[in-house]
C-alpha cells in the first residue's frame, strides 16, 4: 500500500546504480555482476535506492516512464529473445537437419558431388522451413497472447508534481525506477527492491524449486546492511527479504517496491532461462522421442549395412552409398515441420471458437488430457456470488452484520490497492448503498493461509474522538475467524466463546453449507489509534457479531458440459478452498458424483503416490490452500496422468502453472490469465469440451503423418537392404531416396486439413510408442514387399539388361514408389468403411507425388537424379504391382483392426 513519504533531497547528486555499466545495453551483464548489483540494492536504505534511479515514493511521471521504456527496452518473457537468437540455432540443430548434414559429408567423402550438393541444399531447405514455420507459429501465438496480457500495478503521475495514481500497465512496460504495488496473486514483473510490506510472502518455486513460499519484508526506516566480505560466497538473492525477482508470484500480503532491473537485465535474464518459458510438454517429449528414436535406429543400421555389404560382396565402395541410402530412407525430414503446422492450424481453429491458445503445445495437451481439476466458482458455478443471508450468532436476520461486512469489503479493496477485489467483496459491494460513518485507516489483506481480511476503521466525524473510537473489523472463513474470537454477541448479551459455543457455531455453518450457502463470519473489536501498521498479531480478542451468507448460482450449462467431458473420457476432480458441504452441493447440482471429500488439512500426512491414488474422479478436495491445489496437480502428473486445471481466481494461479494445460476464462483474475495456457473467451466448460475435441483432431492428424511416414520409410529400408543383396548394382541412390522423402513429406502437409474419424476423438490420446512400433511392424512389410516386387518385375523387362538398365530400374522404382505412397496416404489415413471421406486438399496432395514421379524423368533434373523416361513395356508391370499393393494394404488394414480393435 502506498502512503506519502518525505520527498527525496534533489540537491544530492544521483550516484550511479550498482551495475550501471550494464544499463542501456541489450543484456544485463554476467550473472555474477547482476547478483552483485541486486545485493547492492538490498543492502542500501530505501531512499538511497530511489535516489540512484532518480525516482521518488510517488512514482515516475508518464513522460519519464516512456523515455525509460525507449532507453531500456521492454521487459521480456523470453519469447522474443528466444525467437530472435535461439530459433535459428534450434532449426539448424534439429535432429533430421543434423542427419542430412552428416549424410552430405559422407557423400562428399565417396566423391558424389551431386548428392552432396543436393543433400546439403535439402538440409538448408528443411531448416529454413522449420525456422519459417516456428516464426509463423510464434507470431500466431503472440497475436493470441495480446488478448491475455499480464499486467502490473505501478504508481504513475500524469505530470511532474501531480498526485500519483495506481495504474495497471502491461508487465513488459514496467521500467527501472517504477514504483510497483504488489498484492496476492501478482506475478512480479521485474527485479524489485522492496520498500515496505505487510505480511508479504512470495512463491519462488519457478526459480528455486522450493515449494514453500518465502517471507519478504522491508520498511522505510531500515538502515543499510553491512557489505559482504570480499572473496566470500555469492550473495543469496533468493533468500534476501528485500528482493523480489522476476517471474515469482505473490502468495499473500502486500508490498511496495521499486523496479531495479527489467527484461534481460534481470537475474533470470542473465541466466538465459526466464521462468515464463514453459516446461516441456507431453507433445514435445513425444516428438523428440520419435525423432531421436529414428536417429538411433539409423545409427544402429549404418554399421550393420556397411558390414553386411562389405562382407557379402567385398565391395566397400558400394556398401557406403547403400548405407547412406538406408540412413536417408529412415529419416522423416519434415516431422517437426508437419507437427508444428498441425498445431498452428489447431490453434487458429480454436481462436475462431473464442478459445485463445497462448502456447501451441497446449493444443495437443488438451486432447491428451484425461483428468481435469476444476475450481468451483466460475467453472461449475457462475463467477458472481449472490448474497443469501445476514445472520446474528443465534441465526436471526441482522442488517448490522451486513453493514460491518460491507465496510470491511469496501476498505479492503480501497486500502489494498487491488482494482479487482474478490468475488466476495464484489458481491457485498453490489447495491451496497451509503456506507458513510467510517473511513479506512489500515488493512491486513486476505490471504489463503489466514483465510480472513481485517480493516481498521475510524469515524469520519470531524469532531474530536476518543483514542478507542477505532473499530477493527474481520471477516473470513468461520473456523478461522472463530480462532481469533473470545466472545460472541447474542440476543441476551455477550457470552464467552467456549468449546460448546464454538461447536454450535460450526454446526450452524455446516447446516447452511449443506443447502449450498457459504457462511463468512464477521467479528469486531474496539481499538485505540495504533502507533504502527496493523499485523496479523492484532487479530485477537475479537467479538463475533454474526455471519453473511453467499450462494453460488450453478452455471446452467455446467451439467451438460460435465456429461460431455465424461463421454470424452475426461475425469473431473473438484479442488476448492470452499466449505466441503458447499462443494458437495455444487457437485450434486452439476451432476458430478461425489464419493469422498478430502480436506486440505489431511494432505500433509500423504505422500504424492497416496495422494494420486486418493484423487479419483469422485473425490472432492475442499478447504485447500493454493499451494495444496498445485500439489494435487503435480501428484496426478507424477502418477502418469495428463492433467488440466480450470480455474479463474488468484488462488488458482499456482495450480494453473503446475498443470499440463492450465485453462481459465476471459473474466479471470490477472494472475490466473497470466498462468494459463488456454483462455476461454466465452462458454466455460462447454467451450472447453469443444477445445478438447479440437485438440484430439489435431493429434489424430499428427499420428496419421507419423505412422504413414514411418511405415513408408521402414518399408523402404527393408527393400533397400534386400535389393542390395540381390541386384548387381546399388539398390537405390541416396539422392533419389531423399527426393522421394521430401516429395512425400511435403504432400503430407495437407493432412492438416483432413477430416478425422469420430472413433479417434472419443478418448484421450497421447504418444504411444508401443502402438507405434506395432503399427510399423504390421504395415511396414507391405511396402517392402511392394518395392521388391517392383525390382523383380522391372528386372524382367528386356531393357533392364541393356545400356541404362540401372537407370531404368531406379526410375521404375522411383515412379512406382511415389505412386504407392500417394495411395498409402489415402488408405492409411482412416479405418476405411464408415470413415469420413478425405478432404479435397488431401486428395490433391495424394496425387501430387505420383505426378512428380511421372514428370521428373522428363525434366531438366532427370540427369542430376539419374532418372530416364520409362519405356511403354515397363508400365504394365508397374500397374500390376501398384494394384497388388492397393489390395494388400486394404487387407492388412482389415486384419490389423480385427486383431487390435483400432486403427490410427
Image (spheres, helix red, strand yellow):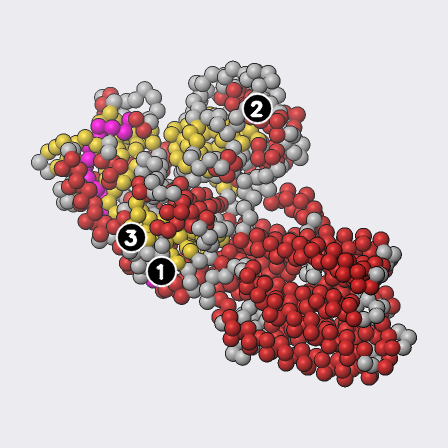
- Quadrant containing the N terminus in the rendered view: top left
Residue 558 has which mark?
1
From the viewer's side, name the closer residue of 588 and 392. 588
- Secondary element under disc 2, as helix, strand or loop, is loop
Q: Find the distance from the CA under tag 2 to the CA under tag 3.
A: 49 Å
Residue at (49%, 66%) from the top-left corner?
A: 761
Q: Is 444 on the left or on the right of 753, as rendered?
A: left
From the viewer's side, name the closer residue of 446 and 804. 804
Q: Quadrant of residue 494?
A: top left
Q: Find the distance from the CA under tag 3 to the CA under tag 1.
A: 21 Å
Residue at (32%, 35%) from the top-left corner?
A: 450
Magenta-tinted stretch: 538-559
Q: Are marks 3 and 1 in contact (CB under 8 Å)?
A: no
Q: Find the distance from the CA under tag 1 to the CA under tag 2.
A: 53 Å
Q: Is 225 on the left or on the right of 462, as rendered?
A: right
User: Do we see residue 652 in this rendering?
Assistant: no
Mark 3 or mark 1: which comes first in sequence?
1
Residue at (37%, 47%) from the top-left corner?
A: 610
- Secondary element under disc 3, as helix, strand or loop, is strand
Residue at label 2?
Answer: 234
Residue 264's x, y, as percent? 61, 35
Amino acid at each position: 500500500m502506498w502512503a506519502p513519504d518525505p520527498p527525496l533531497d534533489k540537491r544530492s547528486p544521483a550516484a550511479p546504480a550498482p551495475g550501471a555499466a550494464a544499463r542501456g545495453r541489450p543484456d544485463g551483464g554476467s550473472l555474477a555482476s547482476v547478483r552483485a548489483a541486486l545485493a547492492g540494492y538490498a543492502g542500501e536504505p530505501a531512499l538511497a535506492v530511489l535516489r540512484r534511479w532518480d525516482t521518488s515514493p510517488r512514482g515516475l511521471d508518464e513522460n519519464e516512464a516512456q523515455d525509460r521504456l525507449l532507453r531500456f527496452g521492454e521487459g521480456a518473457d523470453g519469447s522474443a529473445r528466444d525467437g530472435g537468437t535461439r530459433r535459428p540455432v534450434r532449426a539448424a540443430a534439429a535432429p533430421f537437419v543434423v542427419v542430412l548434414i552428416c549424410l552430405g559429408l559422407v557423400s562428399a567423402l565417396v566423391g558424389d558431388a551431386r548428392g552432396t550438393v543436393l543433400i546439403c541444399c535439402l538440409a538448408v531447405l528443411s531448416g529454413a522451413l522449420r525456422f519459417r514455420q516456428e516464426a509463423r507459429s510464434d507470431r500466431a501465438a503472440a497475436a493470441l497472447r495480446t488478448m491475455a496480457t499480464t499486467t502490473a500495478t505501478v504508481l504513475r503521475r500524469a505530470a511532474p508534481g501531480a498526485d500519483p495514481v495506481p495504474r495497471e500497465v502491461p508487465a513488459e512496460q514496467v521500467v527501472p525506477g517504477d514504483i510497483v504495488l504488489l498484492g496476492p496473486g501478482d506475478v512480479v514483473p521485474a527485479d524489485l527492491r522492496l520498500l515496505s510490506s505487510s505480511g508479504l510472502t512470495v512463491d519462488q518455486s519457478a526459480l528455486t524449486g522450493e515449494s514453500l513460499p518465502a517471507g519478504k519484508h522491508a520498511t522505510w526506516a531500515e538502515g543499510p546492511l553491512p557489505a559482504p566480505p570480499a572473496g566470500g560466497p555469492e550473495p543469496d538473492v533468493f533468500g534476501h527479504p528485500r528482493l523480489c525477482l522476476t517471474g515469482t508470484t505473490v502468495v499473500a500480503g502486500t508490498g511496495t517496491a521499486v523496479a531495479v532491473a527489467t527484461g534481460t537485465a534481470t537475474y533470470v535474464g542473465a541466466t538465459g532461462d526466464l521462468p515464463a518459458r514453459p516446461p516441456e510438454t507431453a507433445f514435445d517429449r513425444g516428438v523428440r522421442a520419435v525423432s531421436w528414436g529414428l536417429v538411433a535406429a539409423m545409427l544402429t543400421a549404418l554399421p550393420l549395412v556397411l558390414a553386411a555389404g562389405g562382407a557379402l560382396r567385398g565391395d566397400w565402395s558400394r556398401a557406403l552409398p547403400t548405407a547412406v541410402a538406408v540412413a536417408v530412407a529412415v529419416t522423416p525430414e519434415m516431422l517437426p515441420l508437419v507437427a508444428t503446422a498441425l498445431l498452428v492450424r489447431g490453434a487458429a481453429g480454436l481462436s475462431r471458437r473464442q478459445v485463445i491458445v497462448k502456447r501451441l503445445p497446449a493444443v495437443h495437451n488438451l486432447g491428451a488430457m484425461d483428468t481435469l481439476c476444476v475450481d468451483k466458482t466460475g467453472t461449475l458455478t457462475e463467477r458472481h456470488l449472490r448474497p443469501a443471508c445476514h445472520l446474528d450468532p443465534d441465526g436471526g436476520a441482522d442488517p448490522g452484520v451486513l453493514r460491518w461486512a460491507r465496510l470491511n469489503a469496501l476498505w479492503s479493496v480501497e486500502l489494498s490497492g487491488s482494482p479487482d477485489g474478490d468475488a466476495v467483496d464484489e458481491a457485498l459491494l453490489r447495491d451496497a448503498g451509503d456506507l458513510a460513518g467510517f473511513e479506512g485507516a489500515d488493512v491486513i489483506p486476505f490471504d489463503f493461509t489466514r483465510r480472513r481480511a481485517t480493516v481498521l476503521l475510524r469515524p469520519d466525524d470531524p469532531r474530536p474522538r476518543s483514542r478507542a473510537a477505532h473499530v477493527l473489523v474481520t471477516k473470513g472463513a468461520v473456523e478461522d475467524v472463530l480462532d481469533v474470537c473470545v466472545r460472541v454477541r447474542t440476543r441476551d448479551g455477550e457470552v464467552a466463546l467456549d468449546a460448546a459455543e464454538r461447536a454450535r457455531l460450526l454446526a450452524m455453518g455446516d447446516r447452511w453449507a449443506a443447502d449450498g450457502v457459504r457462511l463468512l463470519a464477521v467479528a469486531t473489536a474496539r481499538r485505540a489509534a495504533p502507533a504502527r501498521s496493523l499485523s496479523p498479531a492484532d487479530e485477537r480478542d475479537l467479538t463475533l457479531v454474526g455471519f453473511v451468507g453467499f450462494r453460488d448460482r450453478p452455471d446452467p450449462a455446467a451439467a451438460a458440459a460435465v456429461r460431455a467431458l465424461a463421454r470424452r473420457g475426461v475425469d473431473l476432480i473438484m479442488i476448492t478452498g470452499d466449505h466441503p458441504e458447499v462443494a458437495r452441493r455444487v457437485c450434486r447440482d452439476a451432476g458430478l458424483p461425489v464419493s469422498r471429500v478430502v480436506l486440505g488439512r489431511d494432505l500433509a500426512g500423504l505422500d504424492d503416490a497416496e495422494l494420486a491414488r486418493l484423487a479419483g474422479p469422485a473425490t472432492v478436495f475442499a478447504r485447500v490452500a493454493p499451494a495444496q491445489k498445485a500439489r494435487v496437480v503435480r501428484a496426478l502428473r507424477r502418477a502418469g496422468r495428463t492433467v488440466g486445471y480450470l480455474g479463474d481466481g488468484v488462488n488458482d494461479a499456482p495450480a494453473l502453472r503446475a498443470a499440463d494445460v492450465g485453462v481459465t476464462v476471459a473474466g479471470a483474475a490477472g494472475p490466473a490469465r497470466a498462468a494459463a495456457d488456454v483462455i476461454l473467451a466465452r462458454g466455460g466448460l462447454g467451450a472447453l469440451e469443444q477445445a478438447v475435441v479440437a485438440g484430439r483432431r489435431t493429434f489424430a492428424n499428427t499420428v496419421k503423418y507419423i505412422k504413414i511416414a514411418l511405415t513408408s520409410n521402414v518399408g523402404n529400408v527393408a527393400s533397400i537392404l534386400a535389393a542390395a543383396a540381390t541386384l548387381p548394382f546399388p539398390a537405390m541412390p541416396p539422392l533419389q531416396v531423399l527426393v522421394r522423402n521430401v516429395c512425400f513429406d511435403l504432400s503430407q502437409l495437407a493432412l492438416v486439413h483432413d477430416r478425422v474419424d469420430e472413433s479417434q476423438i472419443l478418448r484421450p490420446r497421447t504418444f504411444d510408442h508401443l502402438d507405434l512400433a506395432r503399427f510399423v511392424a504390421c504395415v511396414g512389410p507391405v511396402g517392402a514387399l511392394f518395392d521388391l516386387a517392383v525390382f523383380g518385375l522391372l528386372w524382367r523387362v528386356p531393357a533392364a539388361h541393356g545400356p541404362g538398365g540401372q537407370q531404368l530400374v531406379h526410375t521404375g522404382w522411383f515412379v512406382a514408389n511415389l505412386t504407392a505412397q500417394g495411395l498409402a496416404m489415402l488408405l492409411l489415413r482412416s479405418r476405411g468403411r464408415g470413415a469420413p471421406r478425405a478432404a479435397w486438399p488431401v486428395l490433391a496432395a495424394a496425387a501430387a507425388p505420383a505426378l512428380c514421379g511421372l514428370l521428373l524423368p522428363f525434366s531438366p533434373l532427370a540427369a542430376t537424379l539419374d532418372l530416364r523416361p520409362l519405356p511403354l513395356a515397363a508400365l504394365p508391370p508397374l500397374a500390376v504391382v501398384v494394384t497388388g499393393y492397393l489390395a494388400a494394404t486394404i487387407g492388412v488394414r482389415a486384419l490389423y483392426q480385427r486383431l487390435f480393435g483400432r486403427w490410427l
